[in-house]
Image: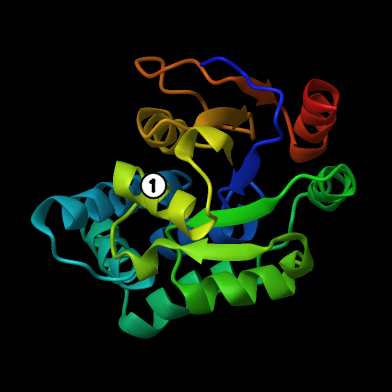
């Protein structure tokens, strides 16, 4: 994709891109008594959210998270009850931002970039996450796919975000730590940036991202240099 000099509207994924999910990983691994428990469960969560898209039967992300955590426990022959699942998942609302995030977002705002989120999390959870991590004031809109009832990486989610922000898809840049998210954004016509958080990798069968960086401050510095 050709990079234009007009500043793009920056769209941020939230979980693992901005917020450190280590506490949630710890709680899920402890619940499932397996050091790979979180990875297995989170993969199932993403899988069944796309199933929701495919069969046009929407449940919010928290509901699918609970159902798939039960499924993960069953697959590991681990007995868990509803209260234990709720307690483990409640950690997601108290996640904190990575140390690089606030500095990076501030640099972007200081240089005239428009910032918004686009997440699969439901609005109530997103609002609490942004409050607890002190990130609310950086974003002009906190967009959740719950309004559309279609999960990323469906193209409709990115196109809907473009309408909400009154821009064209090609005037947006999706910033995420997940290859599947960037694959969807690229397919919808957005420019993309991969944040190489620990344990994350690109989907090599999709388009190469326009930008890559190790954290939000590093990509902020790249974007300021590229568009100023």
Whether residue 72 is visible: yes
Count the labels in the image: 1
The residue at the point 38 percent across, 47 percent down is 159
Left or right: residue 41 compared with residue 50 = right
Q: Nearer the viewer, residue 202 or 2?
A: 2
Farthest residue to the bottom: give it: 83
> Relative to 173, does residue 121 appear above or below in the rendering?
below
> Relative to 152, does residue 7 appear above or below in the rendering?
above
In the rendering, at what x and y percent does residue 100 appear? 82, 44
Whether residue 20 is visible: no
Q: Residues within 10 Å of mark 1 (few under 14, many from 20)?
A: some
In the rendering, at what x and y percent does residue 172 appear? 56, 38
> Relative to 92, does residue 115 appear above or below in the rendering?
above
> Relative to 52, does residue 85 appear above or below in the rendering?
below
Left or right: residue 144 compared with residue 76 = right
The image quadrant that residue 107 belongs to is top right
Left or right: residue 179 compared with residue 17 = left
The colour scheme is: rainbow
> Dividing the image into 4 quarters, which one contains the C terminus?
top right
In the rendering, at what x and y percent does residue 149 appear? 29, 65
The residue at the point 45 percent across, 30 percent down is 179
In the rendering, at what x and y percent does residue 195 appear? 64, 32
Left or right: residue 183 compared with residue 164 = left
The residue at the point 67 percent across, 68 percent down is 130
Q: Which residue is mark 1?
A: 159
Secondary structure type for disc 1 = helix
């Amino acid at each position: 994709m050709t990079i234009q000099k007009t500043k793009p509207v920056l769209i941020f994924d939230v979980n693992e891109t901005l917020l450190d999910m280590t506490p949630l990983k710890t709680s899920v691994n402890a619940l499932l008594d397996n050091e790979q428990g979180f990875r297995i469960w989170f993969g199932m969560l993403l899988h069944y959210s796309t199933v929701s898209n495919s069969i046009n039967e929407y449940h919010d992300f928290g509901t699918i998270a609970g159902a798939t955590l039960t499924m993960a426990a069953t697959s590991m022959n681990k007995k868990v009850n509803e209260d234990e699942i709720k307690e483990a998942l409640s950690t997601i609302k108290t996640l904190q931002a990575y140390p690089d995030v606030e500095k990076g977002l501030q640099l972007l705002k200081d240089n005239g970039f428009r910032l918004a989120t686009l997440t699969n999390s439901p609005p109530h959870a997103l609002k609490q996450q942004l409050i607890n991590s002190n990130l609310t004031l950086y974003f002009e809109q906190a967009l959740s796919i719950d309004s559309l009832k279609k999960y990323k990486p469906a193209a409709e989610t990115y196109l809907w975000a473009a309408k909400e922000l009154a821009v064209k898809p090609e005037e947006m840049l999706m910033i995420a730590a997940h290859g599947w998210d960037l694959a969807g954004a690229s397919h919808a016509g957005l420019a993309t940036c991969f944040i190489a958080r620990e344990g994350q990798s690109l989907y090599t069968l999709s388009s190469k991202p326009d930008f890559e960086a190790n954290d939000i401050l590093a990509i902020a510095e790249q974007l300021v240099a590229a568009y100023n």
